[in-house]
């Protein structure tokens, strides 16, 4: 099917639902095992281009609720996310965690998750222990984002050595999983040069992806929030949009 960069994931689901005569809520879209989020547009996923394969899964649904069905459907709504100099809306559901909300903000703004502090009605939102419903967050609630400073010396963490995996695409080394040990202060460009120097990767153009976002060449692994045991994905190609 043809899709536009400005088209939202939800709009694509609605088109598929009408074509397949299946409720939109039962459809889930994936690219390279990553779920596409309803509140985002196709242009928010730079790895999607002409010819990209998007996988579709369908969860079981009922034309009428069975007698034993008592749980209400999950209701999605929009909240306003406010940064010091800008704001935008994002779609959420009340059962998701604060950590999930931070992931969505990271996808839209590419803001490091570790720098985010979220507040609602003057209360800081805890990452793990409560969902959005428990905080009383509803349609058009305002979520304020404060960014922790990383410029002052006391905020700069000591250099660590990270151990993680680099997963290549199926077109590159048949989907190899490459173990990497490197300092978290190294930039993506420096990591690329190291992998090419020891012939782990051939000399070519690549993009590295962490948590569904393309990584910036001149930014460090620490800046991207990479942790021990995580997996970075590498694809052949280059990105010029948006200053990457």
Image (spheres, rainbow, N blue to C red):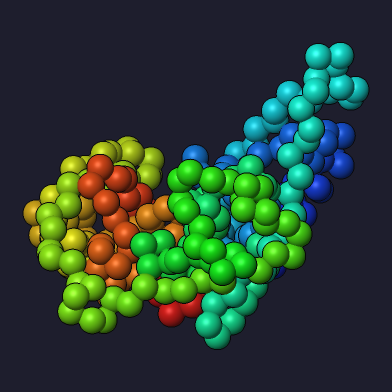
State the image quarter where residue 7 is shown: bottom right
Residue 230 visible in image = yes
Describe residue 130's horizontal placement relative to residue 179 as left or right: right
Query: Is residue 19 depicted above or below 47 in this figure?
Result: above
**What residue is drawn where x is 78% and y is 35%?**
73
Describe residue 7's horizontal placement relative to residue 119 as left or right: right
Residue 228, position in %: x, y? Answer: 23, 47
In this rendering, the count of numbered labels is 0
Quadrant (top left/top right/bottom left/bottom right) for the C terminus: bottom left
Looking at this view, name the residue that lies furthest to the right. 64
Residue 199 visible in image = no
Looking at this view, name the residue that lies furthest to the bottom. 85
**What residue is drawn where x is 66% and y is 39%?**
28
Describe residue 89's horizontal placement relative to residue 187 as left or right: right
**What residue is drawn where x is 59% and y is 65%?**
120
State the image quarter where residue 121 is shown: bottom right
Query: Is residue 68 depicted above or below 3 in this figure?
Result: above
Foreground pick, 214 / 134: 134
Query: Is residue 215 depicted above or below 84 in this figure?
Result: above
Residue 69, position in %: x, y? Answer: 80, 20
Looking at this view, name the residue that lies furthest to the left. 198
**What residue is drawn where x is 51% and y is 58%?**
125
Residue 177, position in %: x, y? Answer: 26, 39
Looking at this view, name the residue that lies furthest to the top. 67
């Amino acid at each position: 099917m043809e899709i536009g960069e400005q088209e939202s994931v939800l709009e694509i689901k609605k088109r598929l639902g009408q074509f397949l005569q299946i409720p939109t809520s039962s459809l889930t879209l994936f690219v390279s095992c990553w779920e596409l989020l309803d509140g985002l547009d196709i242009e928010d996923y730079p790895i999607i281009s002409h010819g990209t394969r998007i996988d579709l899964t369908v969860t079981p649904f009922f034309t009428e609720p069975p007698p034993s069905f008592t749980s209400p459907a999950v209701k999605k709504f929009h909240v306003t996310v406010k940064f010091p100099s800008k704001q935008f809306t994002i779609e959420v559901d009340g059962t998701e965690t604060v950590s999930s909300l931070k992931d969505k903000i990271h996808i839209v703004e590419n803001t490091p998750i570790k720098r985010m502090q979220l507040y609602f009605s003057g209360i800081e939102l805890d990452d793990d222990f409560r969902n959005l419903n428990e905080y009383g967050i509803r349609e058009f609630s305002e979520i304020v984002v404060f960014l922790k400073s990383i410029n002052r010396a006391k905020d700069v963490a000591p250099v660590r050595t990270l151990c993680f995996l680099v997963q290549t695409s199926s077109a590159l080394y048949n989907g190899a999983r490459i173990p990497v040990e490197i300092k978290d202060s190294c930039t993506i460009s420096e990591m690329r040069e190291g992998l090419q120097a020891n012939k782990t990767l051939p000399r070519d153009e690549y993009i590295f992806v962490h948590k569904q976002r393309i990584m910036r060449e001149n930014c460090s692994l620490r800046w991207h929030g990479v942790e021990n045991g995580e997996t970075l994905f590498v694809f052949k190609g280059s990105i010029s949009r948006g200053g990457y």
